[in-house]
Amino acid sequence: MLACSEHHVGIFQPAVARLFVAKFDDVSRDLPVVCIQCGLCAKACPEEAIEKSPENVYFVVESQCTGCGECITACPRGMIKMDSQGKFAVKCNLCEGVPSCVEACPYEALSTDAKKSSSSQYRKRAESLAAELPRRGRS
Amino acid sequence: MNLGGYVGKILRVNLATRETHEENLSKDLAIKFMGGSGLGAYYLYKELKAGVDPLGEENKLLFFTGPITGTSWPTAGRSVFLSKSPLTGIYAESHVGGFLGPEFKYAGYDGLIIEGRSDKPTNLTILDDQVNLEDAKKIMGLNTAESTSLLLEDFHPDAQVAVIGPAGEKLSRTSSIIINMARAAGRCGLGAVMGSKNLKTIAVKGTGGVSVQEPEAFKVAVDDVSKRILTDIQAMEQRKFGTNLLVALKSQIGELVTKNHSRGTFENAEVLMAEHLRENYFQKTRACFACRVGCKKQYRVEEGPFACESEGPEYESVMAFGTNCLNDDFGAILRCNQLCNLYGMDAISVGCTIAFAMELFERGILTTDVIGFPLEWGDASAIVRLTEMIGKREGIGSELAEGSWAFAQKIGPEAMDSVMTVKKMEISGQDGRTHRSMALGHATAARGADHLRSLVIVDQLSYQDVAAERFGKHTLPEICNPYTEQYKAIATKLTEDVYALRDSVITCWYTCSWPAIIWMDDFLRVLPLATGIKAFGEENHLRLMGERLVTLKRMFNVREGITRKDDQLPKRFSEPMPDGPGKGAFVTLDPMLDEYYELRGWDENGIPTEETLSRLGLDF
């Protein structure tokens, strides 16, 4: 989150990061939640302001965005925010290349390589943690 | 204030008048005292009158961050609580990792000063500039995990919460402040300060950020030091095993604190060593904010009467509830550590107080009638039971909750031979007999028997190259011999100065002290990049600041009547070590004290001279 905000806005400000780490201190678990580039936001956008790159990464064309917030409602992971002035939507664009979060993680917990994704045991645990999020007041 | 790193504001909250207001952080103070425990100590010294009751209305609770807190600097998650200690009656600082410090800065504040006493149970909630005092009645009496969960539901799901448990509410002098459910500002009994103020929690959510003066160069410096951490063999061992590595290391030099600090080895130590714990109980690694080490370990004990899963214990808890009580049952240690987190108690003080009570039982001074059950060495069930009684302040637990020194005073002079404290604080898991610089550190540290303010770890672990670099080649080989007093005063003094900076910057023990990765050169490089303050790039300025901070904390204690007569160790340490590799070793403290005072510019009675105060800019 630090690397993300540093990359995109130049300061250390986790509140504007384009990913988040949900913390479950009561069970000592952490769940990083990242954009999986599913494209539901692009489908929901009435202005066609979210486009897809040749690498299948969805990005916001700021000049076309009206700030209506349809994409925020559409995102199942709560990954889209408005910029600090509320003018346009902000989402993960994988830093247009090598994501800074992946580079920064010293525990190699983040990867852009789908083959490295978690074993089924961890996936199951992650899913059960994710199911907990709404109950804890997170989208 | 136009500085990088800092956010420029101090928040002042008066619980009696329920007023809150912001003050600007002065640049001059930042240049002179840095932040963290340095700046906090300045405010504490200026604002507390001598002799105030630690649990009275006049005492204050301070919380400070440093200029790199909340940035991407490795281990920039540390923060510090300061106050006058209810356990020791002198200066108190208690550091904690986790995520609270950065969140506080994102809310827009470098420091917090809490004054007065609320007439009803209160939560302090901070959402950026919205600072509120809310009714805490609903969570009073709940343990720290339950309280934190309710705050997250009621206030903000992503808040960081500092909370006291039943121990702090009941004003136990061994109570702690818990954050993230398993991180503790453990020592000095600061939970009781919150309790005495009727303050149950401090919950913070910040949406702002921290900027640095020169982002590009800062990033290069951070990448550079991260790389050094990630390729350091010992740091990676720490990542795998956590601080429990020390059980094996200390066994090797005969410093594994055993049987109420009477011995230096424990015959069953193997089952408490890090490799054994990892093989049998390890679940998961967790890290504090921006940490590249990740020393926190989650363990689970599947079977037996103490089956449980919990974060921790650290080496110090394994010592306090394990070796120091002759207990080799890891389940019981894990359970006691969990109880300490839930009730909000300092694991070192509570575990060592139980070891002390066990010795009194062995000597016939405490009996089954008084305790309610026998308290034999190594009795795991009795240790767990007593820990819970201390948490609840039930029966004899209520008196032990006040700490070993207070308990010994109550019993009488015959108990004083068994009490292992310095300045009323339970001695941590080191032994000056087989780690001579630590003897001086325990004797002189500002908050009492403290292993964190000056621990010269390079002698203990024989880091020859590091020792030569820090203290000069001429100090070899003696400096790396933990069994001799030679060069230990100079090593203690120089190390303590740098650690005072470490605690003001604030960066974590692990990477600065052990393993020895971050040191003066790194501070000189990164602090000007973060803050834009050029003086932070001058070695003389930082070295003088380190000295200033140590002497400032001493002045707080001098004002409370502390002199050389208090810089003493229990008699046990001047008697020969009975066992292990250091058999026969004992501490000769006085020559080290003389040398240390001289190096510090304090007189032979341990009082800083006028000349020293003026040299350090402390003549106010």
Image (cartoon, rainbow, N blue to C red):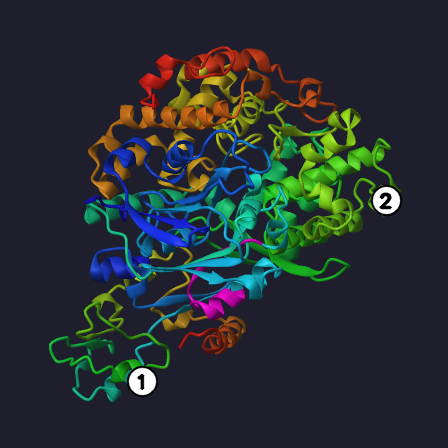
Whether the residues at callouts 2 and 1 have beta carbons within 8 Å, the answer is no
Q: Is residue B517 visible?
A: no
Instruction: Give the extent of the magenta segment.
Output: B149-164
**Direction from residue B219 to residue A113 in the image, left or right:** right
Locate residue B509, reporting x and y percent: 46, 39
Check disc 2 and report the residue beneath it. Answer: B374
> Where, quadrant-wise, is the N terminus of chain A in this rendering?
bottom left
**Direction from residue B245 to residue B529 in the image, left or right:** left
At a point 58% along the width and 38% down the height, the residue shown is: B86
User: Please, what is the three-letter code of the amino acid marked with disc 2?
Assistant: Pro
* Up-down relation of residue B612 to residue B411 (above or below): above
User: Please, what is the three-letter code of the amino acid marked with disc 1?
Assistant: Ala
At a point 38% along the width and 64% down the height, the residue shown is: A110
| Residue B555 in which image quadrant | top left
Name the element at disc 2.
loop
At a point 75% along the width and 25% down the height, the residue shown is: B417
Depth order, front residue of B398/A82: B398
Residue B538 sits inside the magenta stretch = no
Residue ranking furthest to the left: A63
Name the element at disc 1.
helix
Q: Which mark is residue A74?
A: 1
Locate residue B618, reporting x and y percent: 35, 23
**Direction from residue A83 to residue B19 in the image, left or right:** right
Chain under disc 1:
A
* Up-down relation of residue B597 to residue A22 (above or below): above
Depth order, front residue of B330/B348: B348
**Badge 2: how crowded within 10 Å, few (<14), some, or many (20+)?**
some
Locate residue A108, reporting x and y percent: 40, 59
Q: CA distance from mark 2 to mark 1?
A: 64 Å
